[in-house]
Amino acid sequence: MGMSAFAKAIDDLFGDPNIGRDAVYTPDGGSAVPVRIIARRADEITGFGEARLWSETTRVDLRLAEVPNPRAGDRIEIDGDTFIIQGEPVRDRERLVWTLDLRSA
């Protein structure tokens, strides 16, 4: 069975040296695995009671084919910086890509 056009487009996107980046994924208590990610930085303002908290969140996309089951607490190293997955990873509708929220380790 062939790869869908959408799956091929995703692989091309992650493989593009201008978009995708090399990273290392390490599950909590597991072995490091080289992966490709797409980084998406977003500044978010979060309301907390009366206070407004500004935080730079780091979001990355990761292929399900490379990491089938990422979990909060797992680590991703990008360009020598280590990040911890926080919150629940979210899958896209096609079930090909995870979006992960990261915080600095």
Image: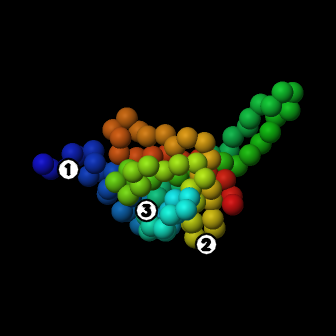
Q: Which residue: 52% across, 43% down?
A: 89
| Picture coordinates of residue 65, whole percent (x, y) | 34, 54
In the image, what residue type sits under mark 1? Answer: Met
Whether residues under marks 1 and 2 lie with C-beta atoms below 8 angstroms apart, the answer is no
| Picture coordinates of residue 3, whole percent (x, y) | 20, 50
Pointer 3 residue: 36
Q: Earlier in the sequence, mark 3 or mark 1?
A: 1
> CA–CA distance between discs 3 and 1?
19 Å
> CA–CA distance between discs 2 and 3?
14 Å
Task: Classify 10 Å Cα crowding around label 3: few (below 14), some (14-19), many (20 and above).
Answer: many
Q: Which residue: 56% across, 66% down?
A: 78
**Left or right side of 71 for 1:** left
**Left or right side of 13 for 25:** right
Quarter of the rendering occupied by the C terminus: bottom right
Residue 3 circle label: 1
Task: Classify 10 Å Cα crowding around label 1: few (below 14), some (14-19), many (20 and above).
Answer: few
Describe the element under mark 1 as helix, strand or loop: loop
Give the camera-side residue of 73 and 34: 73
Pointer 2 residue: 80
